[in-house]
Image (cartoon, grey):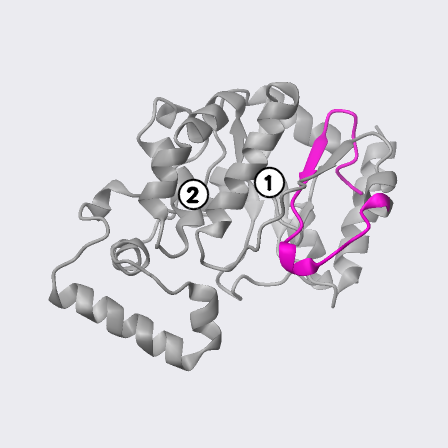
Amino acid sequence: MRLDDENNDIYVHVDKKAGDMDFNDFVQSAKMSKVIFLKDRLDVRWGDVSQVNVTMKLLETAMRAVGGYGYYHFISGVDFPLKTNKYIHDFFIANQGKEFVGFAQNDYYEELKLKIGYYHFIDAYRRRRNFALRLTNKALIQLQKILNIHRHKDLNYFRKGCNWWSITDDFAKEIVSKKDEIEKMYRYTMCSDEIFVQTILWHSRFKDAIYNPNDEFLGCMRAIDWKRGNPYIWKSEDFDTLINSPFLFARKFSEDDMEIIDKIKNYLKSSASSK
């Protein structure tokens, strides 16, 4: 476990769809980190507001456990660190107070109109798998257009970007304090996990602390390639590109190519032992 470090506590949510699991092996593999599994497991679906709900639950659990951390790093099970724990810790100490949230740079107004401009009463996960539900959702959207119904009228208010980030304790408290507002604002929307953190940050007192508002992936310090995939899955031939990049984490990796993981893992192990 590359994030195993005395300065890291690791909070894990395992999707409810995964069924019963024995977490002891994972917990015991951590020699220095405290590993906490969320007992209240959610059925999290792609594009659904459940993505927002699980994010909030992880933040609340971590904040309640010890009263706050220097930084909260939101990563997925297909992410991997590109730097040693010491490098990552030193980086955030040097940039203490900065908010590492990525903001999309393209014109995404039409995307916002589709995702949060109308009510989505049928979740995106089921629509992707059922042609009849896709048609029903399209019909409901068309009806809202005819009736001039808008879920959110001022779409220019919203911001979007990568839903993986590193944020300070103060900003995490700001997010959690708006829990009820968030649930109301993003209920029956689509892919709001890519919107709610960016929107809160942009309209908060923390806006001036954004690390890099002009580059989405430097902004969150994640290596993510949307040009070659959805996103692109890093392969063994990408090793030099990744370790020579400024990014702290990368996504996405796959079990189909463990060679790239082994290469990075060995490189980080060697880097840590040489210092």
Q: Are marks 1 and 2 in contact (CB under 8 Å)?
A: no
User: Which span of residues is magenta-colored?
Assistant: 1-24
Q: In terms of secondary structure, what is the magenta stretch mainly?
A: loop
Relative placement, left or right, of 103 versus 261 is left
Q: Is residue 165 visible?
A: no
Residue occupied by mark 2:
215
The residue most toward the left is: 147
Alpha-carbon distance for marks 1 and 2?
13 Å
**Rendering coords of residue 272 (x, y %):** 82, 33
Lower position in the chain sequence, tag 1 or tag 2? 2
The residue type indicated by label 1 comes to Pro
Relative horizontal placement of residue 34, taking residue 114 as reference (left or right):
right
- Crowding at label 2, few (<14), some or many (≥20) Cα neighbours within 10 Å? some
Q: Is residue 256 above or below residue 267?
A: below
Residue identified by numbered label 1: 246
Q: Is residue 261 magenta?
A: no
**Which disc is residue 153 wearing?**
none
Residue type at mark 2: give it: Asp
Picture quadrant of residue 20: bottom right
Q: Position of residue 118 (x, y in %)?
A: 25, 58
Characterize the local packing of mark 1: few (<14), some (14-19) or many (20 or more) Cα atoms within 10 angstroms: some
Q: Secondary structure at mark 2?
A: loop
